[in-house]
Image (spheres, rainbow, N blue to C red):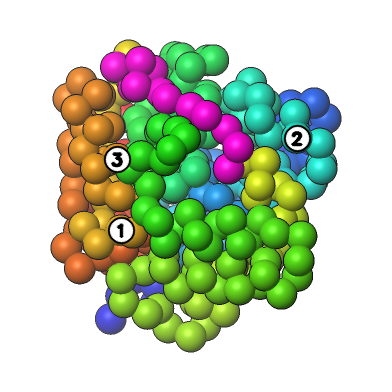
Amino acid sequence: MSATDTIDHQAGKVHRILGSGGVGLHVREWGPDGAQPILFIHGWSACYLAWHNQFDSALRERFRIVCMDLRGHGFSDKSLEPEAYQTGAHWADDVAAVMIELRLKRPVLVGWSYGGFVISDYLTRHGTTNVGAVNFVGAAVISSNPPTHVGERFIDGALMAASDDPAVMIEGVRHVVHATTFKPLPVADTERALVALGLTPPAVRAFLLMRTLDFTDTLAKLDRPCLITQGDEDCIVLPSMAEHIAASVPGATLSRYAACGHAPQQEYTERFNAKLTALAQQV
């Protein structure tokens, strides 16, 4: 029996926080106010529900769990202006706004997939003064043209999911969801992911894909405990990306998951939560 089998779902406290440029951010939290905070940042086209195996687990009894919906995603505001998504300061200041509003002291930053870019945006602009540790989960830190360290299955599906043709867009979302894990998830989890991805407008997906980024220099300056969590069968953000992060961050720990795709937090929940607990204890 997994940890999530014994914990009932709780909606958590709901916050509406004003992010960069006046964007309203949907944020939820669980756990004791005085506990070590962990700030979870989801990936491309997802929402806070990507972390349901964390906030609906025993982690919330021990830590202050905070999950934010990124701008344009989930239940946060969804501007259709490209500049709202293509300026790193917006992403960085959104994270800072959540930290300030909720008074998060040296949180562990956990970034999945595109969340790796968001954490890197934050570190580039604000440094590590108020960061306790970092967990990159199947995370991307380089976006280039032509793409490197990113799988063709994701590129094909993402381009379709960014289409303004509804039929093409829906097929793209289905493609990405089914490519996310190495083995199929329970039906309820798959359906949850499909609905969650559907909350992001196709134009926002396209704006995110247009960014050209390389945070290698930022990673080299990361002076906090760093855990890199990577599925060996990840066909969305390839294992070579995790290897690059590990080679760039001084003293980083690379934790590889065999027979695992792009979502270790869902595919191997107990191990993932145990590793995250150990990282948080270092703060």
Q: Magenta includes 189? A: no
Q: Which mark is residue 234?
A: 1
Please give the name of the residue rendered at 82% of the width and 41% of the height, measured from the top-left corner.
Answer: 79
- Residue at the bottom extreme? 187
Q: Which mark is residue 241?
A: 3
Residue 93 in which image quadrant? top right
SS label for mark 2: loop
Please give the name of the residue rendered at 75% of the width and 29% of the height, measured from the top-left corner.
Answer: 83
* Three-letter amino acid code of the residue under disc 3: Met
Residue 57 in which image quadrant? bottom left
* Three-letter amino acid code of the residue under disc 2: Pro
Residue 87 in which image quadrant? top right
Query: Looking at the rendering, in which quadrant would you find the N terminus?
Result: bottom left
- Label 2–label 1 contact, CB within 8 A: no
SS label for mark 1: loop
Q: Nearest the camera: 101 or 155?
A: 155
Rounded to the nearest angstrom, the CA distance separating label 3 from label 1 is 10 Å
Q: Nearest the camera: 144 or 94?
A: 144
Q: Callout 1: 10 Å neighbours few (<14), some, many (20+)?
A: many
- Label 2–label 3 contact, CB within 8 A: no
As drawn, is 233 to the left or to the right of 33? left
Please give the name of the residue rendered at 41% of the width and 23% of the height, measured from the top-left corner.
Answer: 215
Query: Looking at the rendering, in which quadrant would you find the C terminus?
Result: top left
Q: Which residue is mark 2?
A: 82
* Three-letter amino acid code of the residue under disc 1: Asp
In magenta, the rendered stretch is: 209-220
Q: Magenta includes 219? A: yes
Rounded to the nearest angstrom, the CA distance separating label 2 from label 3 is 26 Å
